Amino acid sequence: MATIPASRSILSRLPPMRDRQVDVLVIGAGAAGLTAALAAAARGAWVLVLARGSLPESNSAWAQGGIAAALDPADSPGIHVADTLIAGAGLCDPAAVAVLANEAPALMRELASLGVPFERDADQFALGLEGGHSRRRIVHVGDATGRAVTQVLIERVRATPLIAIREQAQAVELLTAGERVVGALVRMVDGTWWRVLAKATVLASGGAGALYGLTSNQPTALGEGIALAYRAGAEVADMEFVQFHPTVYRTRAGHGFLITEAARGEGGLLFTPGGRRFMPDYDPRAELAPRDVVTRGIVAAMQAEGCDHVLLDLTHLPAHLIEHHFPTICTHLRADGIDPTRTPIPVTPAAHYLMGGVRTDLSGATSLPGLFAAGEVACTGVHGANRLASNSLLECLVFGRRAGEAAAALRDQEVPLPDPLPPAPISAPPDANWRTILADIMRAAGPIRHGDTLSAALIRLATWPVSADPDEADHLTAVNAALTAQLIVAAALLRTESRGGHFRQDYPHSEESWRKHIVLCRQAEPWVVPTIAPVAEREKVGERR
């Protein structure tokens, strides 16, 4: 397969710019970005954080279930590692998983000491159970853990003199000097442009669930950071592995609202609209199977009964338990006319998490000097082919800190002037309904895939505009979103097997020869590698067998 076409720039013309210079530029203000900023500032770096929207808005803030950490005496980081490796379907990097699990317990205690009000059982953390975990290890703040954690991080960032924040700021292009990243072009909400020069840049811009239309993510989660990195020449990996959360409620307004994994962990059961409980017939772990298994079980049940949803039933549980554990869910559902203590919740799988992203090592370093990545935009190898529930916020915190520390270590370096950014060839603006069009195309890369539909989707994406008017923020977003969509579809077409979050009807089984990672890079043929950490050895996809 040929490379995914990507001009070095998407700007049809260069706008007037104001220059700014910092030690560390952080693109993204969720848990990973805020943690990276705090870690860099703690080491004396001047930091600028760019928030795509207003500061409280991020996928991290929407995270409900909690954070996985081996805190129970009957648990251990080693057991946490084992559960993560099983969920990852043979593609996790054991070194990255070990870092994640071993740093988790102390990190949870640190967050609690900073004021995150994790639920307690006497003087111990109250630990929940979620699918794929063999022990209770989910620390949580009701069903709004992400918001509680990000609020504490935001307070600390605002109180740190070395950190500046710019909200409503869209990073449009990474700046490079040779092969080194030296900052970014940024479009501010008032239409002005900044050229931010930085000794180190940390991408923490989140995932790409909103490419699919119905999603548990923020509507801005369109994978723009991945597009920026790819266009600059960074390697991206595992883009075919998209996790679809099995239980998302479609609101009356048509938006996705996640019903946390913990609802099934506490005893929630899945039924078809006709009243048949189907998961025990699909997998012996039933509702507590890993997310990809539950998602495919739901899809199979919907296809068998010709319906567009199934029912998540909590009504057999004590009402006070539902109210206590899921107050946010109860409030949102009741506002939509559903009382989950009395009525089963209609749910359907929806795009939730991207396991792939910009390829990094254990310090968040990418294949481009000066560029680091953390959180969902990164591919550390922690999640493999399928993320274990409640490892996402944990990854943001663990590897956000590591990326911030590594970025701050470059603060004494000189920043070379960036290479001139050539204007992109002028192309027609995308259709005004580009989000709907893109969501329709991305159905080919949904929970169940086939080579024919993936090929057709890639052909449609190849006609997408490759440049945009810098005065049109929505056009810039559309071009970046479509590039990331191409990377997902291309990788899904290349992987001729089924594994984790990637299921091909035409290749329904896992193959040992595919226990490798697909790496994509601008102006290079795709290749596969045995480990996610950046390495020099390359094996072309077509020669791997």
Image (spheres, rainbow, N blue to C red):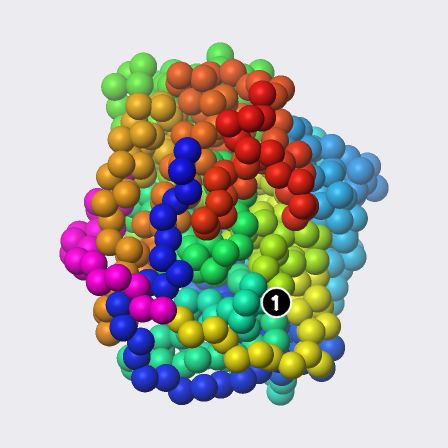
For mark 1, give the secondary structure: loop
Q: Which residue in the protein does label 1 denote?
A: 370
The structure residue drawn at horizontal position 49% and vertical position 85%, both measured from the top left corner, is 20
Residue 439 locus on image (x, y percent): 28, 43
Q: Nearer the viewer, residue 495 or 388?
A: 495
Q: Is residue 287 visible?
A: no
Q: For residue 438: magenta? A: yes
Q: Is residue 307 left or right of residue 110?
A: left
Majority secondary structure of the magenta segment?
loop
Quadrant in the rendering for residue 70: top right
- How many marks the image carries: the answer is 1
Q: Residue at x 22, y 62 (%)?
A: 426
Q: Is residue 477 left or right of residue 396?
A: left
**Magenta residues (range):** 422-441
The foreground one among 224 and 197 is: 197
How far across and down, in percent of the image, does residue 315 sit? 43, 32
| Quadrant of image for the C terminus | top right
Residue placed farthest to the right in the image? 73
Please tell me how crowded label 1 is: few (under 14), some (14-19), or many (20+) other residues with Cα within 10 Å: many
Considering only vertical position in the picture, is 203 above or below 494? Answer: below
Give the x, y percent position of residue 58.
46, 61
Q: Residue at x 62, y 63 (%)?
A: 369
Q: In the image, residue 202 lies at what x, y percent?
A: 57, 66
Q: Quadrant of the N terminus?
A: top left
Q: Name the amino acid type tagged 1.
A: Gly
**Residue 428 at least partly seen:** yes
Q: Residue reaching furthest top? A: 281
Q: Say whether residue 39 is left or right of residue 295.
A: right
Figure quadrant of residue 462: top left
Residue 183 among those drawn in magenta: no
Residue appearing at x 36%, y 64% in the figure = 9
Looking at this view, is 493 or 136 the one in front? 493
